[in-house]
Amino acid sequence: MMKKRYLVTAALPYANGPLHIGHLAGAYLPADIYVRYLRLMGKDVVFVCGSDEHGAAITVRARKDGVTPREIVDTYHTILRDTFQKIGIGFDIYHRTSAPLHHETSQDFFRTLLVNGQFDEKESDQYYDETAGQFLADRYITGTCPVCANLDAYGDQCEKCGSTLSPTQLINPRSTLSGATPVLRPTTHWYLKLDEHETWLREWINTGVAGGKQLHDPAAWKNHVIGQCNSWLEQGLQPRAMTRDLEWGVDVPPELPGAKGKKLYVWLDAPIGYISATKQWALDRGVNWELYWKNDDTALIHFIGKDNIVFHCLIFPAILKAHGEFILPVNVPANQFLNLEGNKISTSKNWAVWVHEYVNDLPGREDELRYNMIKNMPEQRDSEFTWKGFQESANTELVNNLAGFIHRVMVLTHKNYTGVVPAFDSSREFKSGWNAEEITTCDAELHRLHEKLDELGAEIERFNFREALRILMEISSAGNALLQFNEPWKAAKDDPELVKVALNLGLQYVAVLSVAMRPFLPFAAARLRQMLNLSPLDDHREWLDTLNDLAEGNPVLRPNHALNAAEHLFSRVPDDVIEAQIAKLQAAAQANQQAAPPSHPLVKETISYDDFAKLDIRTGTIIEAGRVEKADKLLRLTVDLGFEKRTIVSGIALHYQPEDIIGRQVIVLANLAPRTMRGIESQGMILMAEDAKGRLSFVRPEAAWPDGWAVK
RNA sequence: GGCGUGGUAGCUCAGCCGGUUAGAGCGUCGGAUUCAUAAUCCGGAGGUCGAGAGUUCAAGUCUCUCCCACGCUACCA
């Protein structure tokens, strides 16, 4: 499905931290390869990205560091922008969501949705800090994680166990602004009626048809992308709040009643960044941005990691459709996750390879990292980065195979022909590099190169970057074999014609590689162009031209063209560099672990004896225990209080087996209001001790004790 | 508990709208070679395709059950 125009987006990185290799392998590298290829094919393509600079995490961070949010985002925006540039991610524009143009664009979008009747205004209860006098963003509330019992989980997420949370799930919530216990207060927000979009989204995802038009081929989408979307659609889409009570973000259009203090939520902020970035790019060039967003001849493609699938495949498309004028993405080739040395990459545990540190520690080795990332790209499933693997791929494949081949052709040409591309008799036969048994001619081999280059491009178009890279290396291997089979170093004396053909063709391989390498290894490709004394690639259909030349049997490098001096394109990565990186990784993780000892929860606000006396706590004995259907964490207990038996549902199933706890004496909060969980009424609560790791332990009298008596 | 994705050679991964002896790279073993950064080329070994059952003339490839990993989701007073 070739289109006239391409708009390629890469997920906006959040501007409160630097970039790690997982980000690179997940979204930016595949996007960059794809875009570089399209440019070399002469396509009209715009590649946009930018920093996502709003939200509570940034204000929390600013408060902690004692600086303004502006300072935080300025710092990281600069780091991110420079890192992308240094590792060779060639955005056409790297914008930022704090730009006024972005604020205007987002607000206009909001207004249009409002006019189109896409919102419901609804009141809901949100946590409010009475001391600070404001509503609390999820990030401003901390408390005990209900999943892993981490004492410092945020209202939106527990960083220890990674669970997604909502503030009301937190046990013992506290405001990070004042330390006070927040209270629930009603507030009004604008909800996008996502449920009304469910039907067309389901059809669009599964058939590619929307509004009666075939917009894409679902077979071209990755399994896990469609799978996850359907998983969500299955559960039914709910209206989603598009605004929040935040202090740092895009204002809800101020002319609207009730807009005061409210900001657009990420859903209507970050992805609109793609649009505002395009606008800015177009403005800078006097181009019409709408061609890229509102025209059916444009292919919109989002490169993201798998954590962003639902957002880019369901919510953002719903928003675009709700607006009415925008096109939908033709594909969302999300990658899975990259693990690091056997563990998940974790920012909070400092288990990561930071790209800005990499370019500093291993200067001039940008392509080596890119190569390994592509070779192990998590295209269909999670994959793994190891420093040992990095060293191996760099040394065996880039140094030995690729750089080695190029160097030997160059050196032989300099020895035999003083660095000038030799002319040769085109009828002369020789052994093919693709098969030692096959006798071939230069013309036939140029056609074979054409096939390979064409195939390579097709794999890129299908987002099969690993396979594309494999074909690139296959060309290099065939080049090595060409030399091996024809042995031009031997033939110089008795068969000079053979030497001419073999080296000429070898040089054609190298010239083709100088183009084909560019999407993957842009720095080395530039060095190689220089070495070959060819003009630098400027992304104007050089790939297409090369294909055309080869198809017609024309050499890419003409006879008598003078080459520059032979140089090694890559150098070995020595052991000590790798060892240093491994040591650094482990040291950082360890330091992080030591720096963050488990903190005890703050003591809650003082209460009177009367408050305590309201609690009726009794001894009891578990006489029955069983699992609760369809619940991982719940046990249904029957507890004997001596004077009566109670049914109590308790969230201890992960810590105790039912058969092990029958007969166990426990302490019961006996006058807690009954509550129904999973269809069972719980008449009380078992008191448990809990440690920093979330382990639970029964609390009980130190020796057998009669049931039903008070604990005071 | 529900949903989704994955579980294929020592390692990293392809293949999966069923169809000849299951593939690649790296590693390993043997051989050739020396123009080239101890590089290169050729060849071999290595997999009962997570487990079990079923459909079929034929199943990594379809169905069911189970196990494991990852993600989302429910339960936690």
Image (cartoon, rainbow, N blue to C red):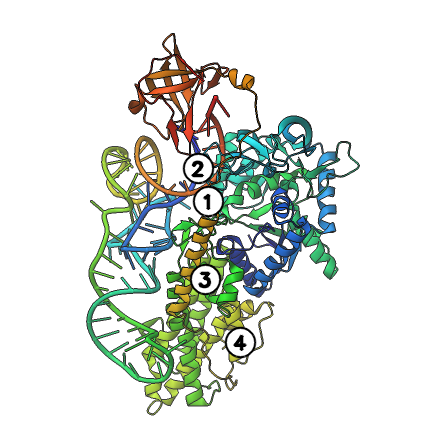
Residue placed under numbered mark 3 in the picture: A455
**Residue drawn at (37%, 18%) of the image:** A637
Q: Position of residue A430 (x, y in %)?
A: 35, 80
| Nearer mark to the viewer, of 3 and 1 | 1
Question: In the rendered structure, which disc, 3 or 1, sits on the residue that comes first in sequence?
Answer: 3
Query: Do callouts 2 and 4 mark residues in contact (Cβ within 8 Å)?
Result: no
Amino acid type shown at disc 4? Arg
Q: Are marks 4 and 3 on the same chain?
A: yes
Question: In the rendered structure, which disc, 4 or 3, sits on the residue that comes first in sequence?
Answer: 3
Residue placed under numbered mark 2 in the picture: A692
Residue placed under numbered mark 1 in the picture: A597
Q: Are marks 2 and 4 on the same chain?
A: yes
Amino acid type shown at disc 1? Pro
Query: Do callouts 4 and 3 mark residues in contact (Cβ within 8 Å)?
Result: no
Amino acid type shown at disc 3? Glu
Judge from the rendering whether residue A322 lies leftward or rightward of residue A586; answer left or right: right
Splitting the image into 4 quarters, where does residue A709 fall?
A: top left
